């Protein structure tokens, strides 16, 4: 089916053209569960007010779900061999937000709203609450019946080159522009010292730091993440405004302040550099507008990866286990 979708940019509701999204459509639950989106929103807001860093966690949870088995909430399953037990998923957070929203939805509309749709809606609300754009989320996903940790081996990682990132995104129907745009979610992200500390000390064969890191910033990072210090210490991926959804992340990548190697490498290749420049640059006062316009489009595209609709899959009663 096709649907018109909307996005808020700089306080203005922008209407995009008609967009085909398989069997997904905005307002899917308008008759069957009209309070569904408001329930998800109020739940996300409740947790966000207590811990704003959960916004990035919910975005990451949705992203990791969509890249394995498609956007089907398979990442929420709890079992010894499930996706969430895979190494790239061990740091995922935000599960309680989704489970809380699901409990309320089951009380209001039993067996109607999928966990996969709750994830997609929560990710949108997380961006909006962080000062980013708001868009209409096409819904109608159904929950998957398979969740295996072995399937999560191809998730994008912090050591990936641009070529590897490009290949992994292309395998999911996402192009290079989508790649850079979606990585922009790191504007509200955090990571552990474990995932980038190698860049600070013995990155080169001569035992020096990654030369792409600005020298003054290198010293700051070494203070935050000593060579023999706590590898689990959390560091903001956007040094300037870690709780605000904006374009400062792209400015950081441009200026050599990228934390993850995979992020900084986007500046080292001409084609991805152009996209970073477009988002980071201030052209006639349009700083941030371009990113606020493109990010929702990329999110809608990503949120449609290999979705299950119609009679496929199931509508779970509890998000952490199959019916």
Image: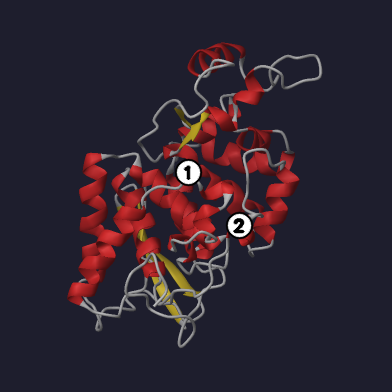
Circle 1 Cα neighbour tier, 10 Å, few/some/many (<14 / 14–19 / ≥20): some
Up the image or down, 238 lies above or below 157; here it is above
- Image spot of residue 77 (x, y percent): 44, 63
Q: Secondary structure at mark 1?
A: loop
Which residue does the numbered mark 1 point to in the structure image? 91
The quarter of the displayed image where residue 211 is located = top right
Residue situated furthest front in the rendering: 80
- Image spot of residue 198 (x, y percent): 65, 25
Q: Quadrant of the C terminus?
A: bottom left
Residue 150 visible? The answer is yes
Residue 281 visible? The answer is no
What residue is rendered at 51% in x and 79% in y?
22
- Judge from the rendering whether residue 128 lies leftward or rightward of residue 90; answer left or right: left
Disc assigned to residue 152: 2
Up the image or down, 13 lies above or below 214; here it is below
- Image spot of residue 46 (x, y percent): 20, 49
């Amino acid at each position: 089916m096709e649907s018109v979708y909307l996005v808020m940019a700089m306080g203005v509701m922008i209407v995009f053209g008609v967009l085909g999204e398989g069997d997904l459509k905005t307002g899917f639950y308008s008759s069957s569960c009209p309070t569904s989106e408001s329930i998800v929103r109020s739940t996300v807001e409740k947790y966000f007010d207590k811990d704003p860093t959960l916004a990035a966690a919910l975005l990451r949870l949705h992203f990791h779900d969509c890249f394995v088995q498609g956007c089907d909430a398979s990442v929420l399953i709890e079992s010894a061999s499930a996706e969430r037990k895979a190494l790239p998923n061990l740091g995922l957070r935000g599960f309680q937000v989704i489970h809380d929203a699901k409990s309320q939805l089951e009380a209001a509309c039993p067996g109607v709203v999928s966990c996969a749709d709750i994830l997609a809606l929560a990710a949108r609300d997380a961006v909006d609450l962080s000062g980013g754009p708001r868009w209409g989320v096409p819904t109608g996903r159904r929950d998957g019946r398979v969740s295996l940790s072995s399937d999560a081996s191809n998730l994008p990682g912090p050591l990936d080159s641009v070529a590897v990132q490009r290949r992994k995104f292309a395998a999911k129907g996402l192009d290079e522009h989508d790649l850079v745009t979606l990585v922009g979610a790191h504007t509200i992200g955090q990571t552990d010292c474990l995932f980038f500390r190698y860049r600070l000390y013995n990155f080169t064969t001569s035992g020096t730091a990654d030369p792409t890191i600005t020298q003054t910033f290198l010293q700051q990072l070494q203070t935050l993440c000593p060579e023999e210090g706590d590898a689990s210490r959390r560091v903001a991926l956007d040094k300037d405004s870690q709780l605000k959804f904006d374009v400062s992340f792209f400015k950081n990548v441009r200026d050599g302040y990228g934390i993850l190697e995979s992020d900084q490498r986007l500046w080292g290749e001409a084609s991805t550099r152009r996209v970073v420049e477009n988002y980071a640059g201030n052209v006639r006062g349009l700083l941030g507008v371009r990113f606020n316009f493109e990010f929702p489009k990329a999110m809608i595209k990503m949120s449609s990866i290999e979705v299950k609709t119609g009679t496929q899959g199931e509508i779970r009663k509890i998000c952490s286990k199959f019916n």
